[in-house]
Amino acid sequence: MRAATLRTFLSVHTWVGLVAGMALFIAFYAGSVTVFTHELGDWQRADDGAVHAPLERSQALLDALLAAHPESAHSVFLVLPGEHGPQPSAYWYNESSGQSRRFVLDAAGVLEEAPPRLGAVDFVYDLHFTAGLPRTFGTYLFGVVCVLYGLALVSGVVIYAPGLLKDLFALRLGRNVKRLWQDAHNAVGVLSLPFHVVFAWTGAVLAIGLLLLAPFQFLVYEGRLLEILETDFEVAPHVEPAGVTRPMLPLDELLRRAQRELPALEINSIGFHDAGDANAQATVYGELAQRRLTSTGAVALNAASGETIATSEPRDYSPGRAFLYAMYSLHFGNFGHYAVKWLYFVLGLAGAFLFYSGNLLWIEARRKRRQAGQPRRTRVMAGLTLGVCLGCVAGVSATFLAGALLADPWAPRGYYLVFFASLAWALLRPPARAAHELLWACALLTAAIPLAGFAASGEHPLAAMRHGHWHRFMVDAVAVAMAAAYWRMARAALRRGLHGDPNSVWALPRAARD
């Protein structure tokens, strides 16, 4: 390859990485955490939150919502107690306002409205694809970021391909820290390349897929594309209401009939259209283990008569539905059980390292090697990299602390408070000092997570292990291990500042050395 062409690819890789890298760090770090969404929900719950009569309480919730808000009968989605939490939740999409509303029963069994997104786990899940920005804007922005991410992957492969086999496993230890970081960056990038291709592709489609369909919807299919695709999004086509009032069958009867159609279905939710009408539909959703990428099964019933309208299971999916559901599974690791979840967790942390190390390499490549004073741009980029990346790490830990110890609205507030404080600190302090101090903050906040879990649940990690509450024990154990890693990194940052190259943005001022 010509040298000029290689330089072009290097420039594209560098600048696309810088533009998208810090947002992708947040996406990957938060994404690695949300792989264990359900387990994290169990971590901060007290054991007495279980529902002793889940179907009766779910039925009471549905009846109370339909009685208090008759207009909700058009579309209600009921999440049953289980892996999503010990209490049922009902979601009503209000078409007039375009908002989804969530309802639960309080301790006395009275209907109350709750925020659709609630607590630390939901916030970190949203953080994965919004970076903390407003939900709609952040999602579309991340779609664009994923496209840039794919461009960075292509240019990186072109740059690294000539020496792929020779340098793939090279990790040259020594005094040349930049070469060590370069080797680690290249090795992580190449070894996890197939997964990064999947993340970039599925992330872009899931975030801006509707925008990608817009030209076909309006220019090719004259506004009928979504109608054509309806069979790939719905278990059964929506039937217009008959205008005849008819009571629905009880929940337990609807679930029994769905179970009869798909005996292996592990039911977790049920959706209603036109509840109380003779043509009311109830679609029962659950999981079916069939050794496929997706495990979602469903049974559509007439909610008044109980007659089966349609069934859906992975082996019978249409190509469009199989493609759509497979994208979700590939992106979130919803297949392969815990082996895949742990793999995705490690890959998420490795991806965060990839973007963090890419910024560090840019900074090192542009420093003045013969003078202590460094260009302003390198100091600003160092401050932004530390503030955004380490601020995200510390902020996520603070989110779980606030979610466990304070009221639910404090979970996102804890993140924003710590994140912006970290960003300001990184820009005001010398980079070497900021790196050392922020890593210490990450270590302390992360080490406090088991204490917060103990305060929220009344069960310390050893007791959780003894009682067989492995979700709670593993969350605490991973938090301790990551806190230890941040502590070691803080010590390494200080050591490099004191004893590393004095002509570096990461060097401590001479007064601090003395």
Image (cartoon, rainbow, N blue to C red):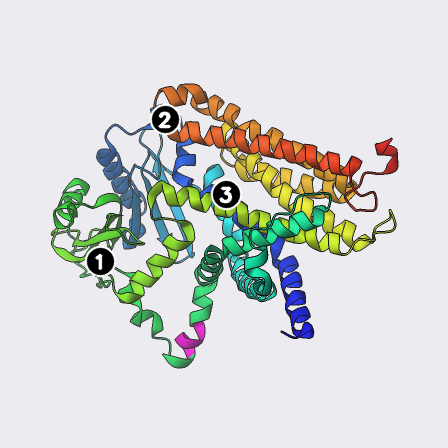
Q: Which mark is residue 315?
A: 1
303 sits left or right of 40 in the view: left
Callout 3: SS: helix
Where disc 1 sits, the SS reads: helix
- Label 1: how many Cα within 10 Å (few below 14, some 14–19, many 20+): few
Closest to the camera, between mark 3 and mark 2, is 2
Q: Quadrant of residue 413?
A: top right
Question: Which amino acid type is marked by label 3?
Answer: Val
The circle on residue 124 is: 3
Q: Tell me the CA gap for discs 3 and 1.
A: 33 Å
Give the crowd class for mark 3: few <14, some 14-19, many >=20 residues within 10 Å.
Answer: many
Instruction: Name the residue type under label 1.
Output: Arg
Mark 2, residue position: 469
* Mark 3 touches mark 1? (CB < 8 Å): no
Mark 3 or mark 2: which comes first in sequence? 3
Give the CA separation, mark 2 to mark 1.
34 Å
